[in-house]
Image (spheres, coloured by chain):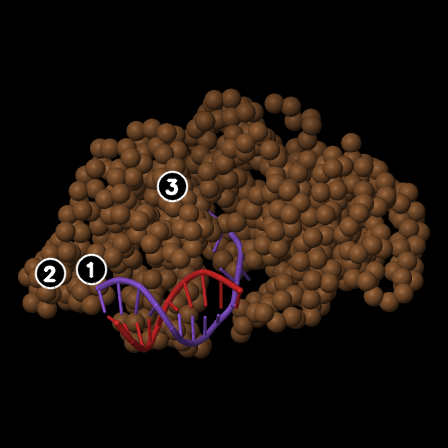
Chain colours: A brown, B purple, C red
Amino acid sequence: MDLSKLNPPQREAVVTTEGPLLVLAGAGSGKTRVITHRIVHLLDKRPNGLLARNILAVTFTNKAASEMKERLVHMAGPRAQNVLVCTFHAFGAEMLREDIYRLGWPKKFSIADQGDQAAIIKRAMRERRIDDREFDPRKVLGLISKAKNAGKTPEPLGEGLGDDYDLIAHMVYEAYQLSLKAQGSVDFDDLLILPSRLLREHEDLRRKYTSRFRYILVDEFQDTNQAQLDLLKLLASGETRNVCAVGDDDQCIYSWRGAEVRNILSYDKYFPGGKEVRLEQNYRSTQVVLDAANAVIAQNPERKAKQMWSERKGGQRIQVVSAPTEEDEARYVAQEISRLVAGGIPPDEIAVLYRVNGQAHPVEEALREKNLRYEVLSGSEFFDRREVKDVVAYFKLIANPRDETSLLRIINVPARGIGDVTMERLVAHARRDSVSLWGAMERSESYEDLPAGAATKVREFQRLVERYRESYEHGHLAQVTRQLLEEIGYKDDAKSLTSSQASAERKLASIDFVINSLETFEKREGPKASLLTYLNRLSLDTRQEEEEAPGGNKAITLMTIHASKGLEFRVVFFIGMEEELMPHKGMQGEAQNLEEERRLCYVGITRAKEALYLTRSAMRVKRGKEVPRTPSRFLDDIPPELVEVLDLDAPRKGPPTAQEQNFFANLKERFKAPQAGGGVAPRVPGGGEGPSGPVSSPPGTARAVR
DNA sequence: TAAAACCTCGTTTTT
DNA sequence: CGAGGTTTTA
């Protein structure tokens, strides 16, 4: 492998193989390159007879993991196949799959998603006579999750009870935990906590894992939480402490999910005696983009100061655009994109970024109007659809009969005459006899308070589930599922429950999508495919299967800033640069985390390679009412000489002088501005009515990209 | 028990 | 405005 193509700090990060190493990798500094080179370097050098299987690389998302694996195999050939590349959660799940029985869970455990978790909390609250309308179960869940991640067991949570929510969380914590276990389920936090427990409590396991993983790499270290750090420390507690953490404290954007910037800021405390390398050369963006990003992030007090620089001097100035309304903003973006695409920018080099998913809608509409292909990368929206959840609940119940949450969800879907009353009674029996709900159902006939008809229906349902459990063992997953849905008449039921034709079709499409994804999974996994492995994959990796673009059509990407982490685009539209949106005003009551919002802004800006648009609107319709909007405070941090302002409202009202003055002022500024090398030509206000006919770019910037 | 009318409330961000 | 859930009614 050729190390000469790396810059000196990069090379140092690659060849410093022994002992703890912290790589502070600023945005666009070739972080992924360093990680892959480091792994290949290890494989080449084979210190102490090291094998690929002795290396563990942990990434933040599954997507990042599979991409990294691909790159490794591409660079180092098949010998890289045995390097384990996965997320912390997937790693934990894998550990638990083998040894969770040692902690008292059934071997075939299932993973509870947020919906399941919320349902369990809700149930626990009701049993304690706590009104789940007055107190949001998801908020309670958040507190419990926080406590779990901080390593607190149900007992010590009682200290320093603050408000009602703390009290409720305390009251419900233990019940939640027990209920989860009784159902043979674990939640996402358990995927990190239970493996740590296994390592702590079982000497043989600790030996097994620490001797296997002699070189550990962690990417996106700034977004690790307490539980992940604990697990990492345990994995590195053997003879070797070769932990290489790569990250950027300025890009910590998941503290709402428990990420601790502290992990990276105090790395030396957790892994003493290590080295620290800083990667400060940016290979991605122009200096203009970088200067703007630096100016924004510089306002944050607690950080490891980095001075990012780029060889791409100058660059296209940043377009700061204000529109009268949200629709105008969207139309401007679409108009501008269509112009850029016509000018030769590939659509997949353009991204529209926003703070919250809801902001995508107007843009989608505007893009459709212009017949521009786009793709919305929205997290788990698909798996949140009711039909999908229902079908998945059938899977979960069939794979794990103890899964009470799934059972209660679908016992009467489609309606089969088993109502709430029946189920409540059965739950009561189950609790009293300390058996699972499924077990209580098996005894339905013996309960006095159940009408014979109800008992019959319950038993019938159980036979159905058991029959299919058998079928899934032997048959094709997708095929059996089709049969199951046919038998229970799910599709007809979904259709009849809906009013409009369109939404009925959407529902049927989601169901087909599940079956298709099942089919794809089966094809890929071969004989290893089972309902349980499918479910595990599903809950860990919410990625939708890549849709093959017909005709290799490239699409514009729409996504949240969170989803854009690690990606880069030649042109970025960062929309909604307004107070309360960027920075986002947190949930009422909770104070917003301004530093994190600033980092978010920084991450968004640094996605841009050549051109950056920061757009906002002066008015937004909220709950049917028009609300005036204030420009984001982050805009004020960007030095004016980097910026070109465009007000889409200006041409409409008043004499054109102000706007024209602005125009000429801009023109003058532009001649002074550092000259771009192959930038993207922005459009300049034409004085027409909003986005309309094309206007030729003024001199100085009219240099379209190839 | 199931369908119809009727409120309510408003989504950060995702493994 | 519209989805989601809850209460009311047949």
Tell me the residue at 70%/57% (across/down).
Answer: A328
Q: Earlier in the sequence, mark 1 or mark 3?
A: 1
Q: CA distance from mark 2 to mark 3?
A: 34 Å
* Quadrant (top left, top right, bottom left, bottom right) of the N terminus of chain A: top right
- Give the vertical position of A193 relative to A278 (above or below): below
Left or right, residue A229 beside residue C5: right
Task: Give the quarter of the image for residue A82.
Answer: top left
* Quadrant (top left, top right, bottom left, bottom right) of the C terminus of chain A: top right
Chain under numbered label 3:
A
Secondary structure under tag 1 reads: loop
Is residue A260 at least partly visible in the picture?
Answer: no
- Give the vertical position of A635 relative to A60 (above or below): below
Task: Give the quarter of the image for residue A213.
Answer: top left
In the picture, the disc for residue A417 is 1
The spot of residue A103 in percent (x, y) is: 27, 51
Tell me the residue at 75%/42% (across/down).
Answer: A339
Task: Give the quarter of the image for residue A515.
Answer: top left
Chain under numbered label 2:
A
Residue indicated by mark 2: A453
Chain under numbered label 1:
A
Residue nearest the viewer, comparing A673 with A499: A499
Q: Report if the CB atoms under discs 1 and 2 are less than 8 Å apart.
A: yes
